[in-house]
Image: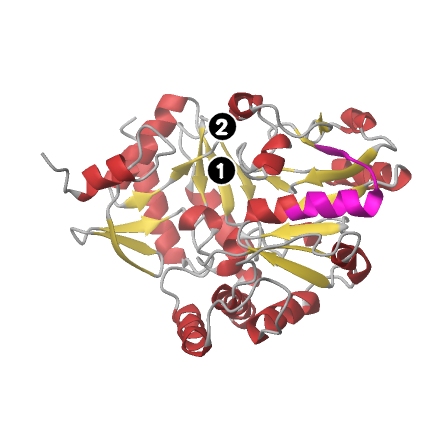
Amino acid sequence: MKKNSAKDIFQTYQAQTFKYPSLLNIDHCKGVYVYDTENKKYLDFVAGVSACSVGHSNKRIIEAVKKQIDKYYHVMVYGEYIQKPQLSLAKLLADNLPKTLSTTYFTNSGTEAIEGAMKLAKRISKKSEIISCLDSYHGSTQGSLSIMGKEFYKASFRPLLPECNKIIFNDINSLDNITNKTAAVVIETVQGASGFKIATDKFLNALKEKCKSCNTLIILDAIQTCYGRTGSLFGFEQTTIIPDILCIAKGMGGGMPIGAFISSWGNMEKLSHNPKLGHITTFGGHPVNCAASSATLNYILDNHLVQKIDAKEALFRKLLVHKKIRSVSGKGLMLSLDLFSENDTNNLVANCMKDGLLLFYFLFNSESVRITPPLTINEEEIELGCNIILRNLDTL
């Protein structure tokens, strides 16, 4: 008998990443709401894991995408032809970043940005060791997986890259692991997979001094924090660190696939020789996705969304008080609802979905729930979602 239902086709012909997917059957999305094929609507507190930063079906992004498609989409591998969407986005990024982060290489995703940054760091430093943090997540391709901070997710795929070692997030003593042999340290200001743990100023300052003394580059993974999610356009702006290489993705496309690694012109031009074509991508910097990213960033800037993030965070923290809530971690609209058990976490996510609210899990933290709504969410929608959470916590 043929399997013809959407569920059957999904589970038979589409590669699975998890034994128990939610199987929400999507029909359309608008603003902060997702609608299934039965026209039930769900308030979205996930935003595609921080990717849909300006809401679903944002008119500005749709117009930018349609306008670009009418002109051209893919025409040539990255870096060969002059394409206005790439130029406009690269210049817009440079205008909103420190002068030492002036030159952008566009990729298709966050993990590709990390891969490129690792290569660039080795090319600049002529060293090979890459250090990252325990409980860090930087992607799932071979190089990114090599620096992931959780062995459980790596063991089945070894051998991986050699000379990938670890420090402990917020542990200054562990910075002794950084030496003159270290090409780069890859760091998040907010750990994206472990429950949105925030790097302390003391730790970041010590890291900066240690890297300076060892002639070690700092690669900052801002893939989940851009644009604006933590209350500044880029998360490092709330610290004293200016990275040597910045990696961004997720929210920079407003729901379209794009990433980037960014550094100085002097650093980036090293990829053009010895060897030439030192980093190559076919679809990186896709003109349609670059147009979407420029529209996303301009929408955030024009509507002063970043300046509204702190107030929205404060409202979440004010409302999310319950005996089943241990704490609320994170920053801005990158929040972790910390419960007391994995069972509570699983039940809350499942029950809230039935009740019309989308929440999601963390890869490394089974006792916490991810809250990352679109930056466009308003007070009424925050209150509605929090009331659904509290109502379902009462039943656990």
Q: In which quarter of the image is residue 144?
A: top right
| Disc marking residue 336 | 1
Q: Is residue 367 above or below residue 237?
A: above
Residue shown at 79%/29% (left/top)? Answer: 175
Residue shown at 53%/50% (left/top)? Answer: 109
Relative placement, left or right, of 192 versus 357 is: right
Residue contact at pointers 2 and 1, CB within 8 angstroms = yes
Residue shown at 67%/52% (left/top)? Answer: 279
Q: Residue furthest front?
A: 275
Task: Give the number of the mark in front: 2 or 1.
Answer: 2
Residue 194, position in %: x, y?
A: 54, 32
Give the residues in magenta.
116-131
Please tell me how many numbered marks the rendered image carries: 2
Residue 130, position in %: x, y?
A: 73, 34
- Among the two numbered marks 2 and 1 on one chain, the one whose residue lies closer to the N terminus: 1
Residue labelled with disc 2: 365
Residue shown at 27%/34% (left/top)? Answer: 351
Residue 360, position in %: x, y?
A: 39, 38
Q: Which corner quadrant holds the N terminus? A: top left
Counting other residues with Cα less than 10 Å from the Cα at mark 1, is it few (<14), some (14-19), or many (20 or more)?
many
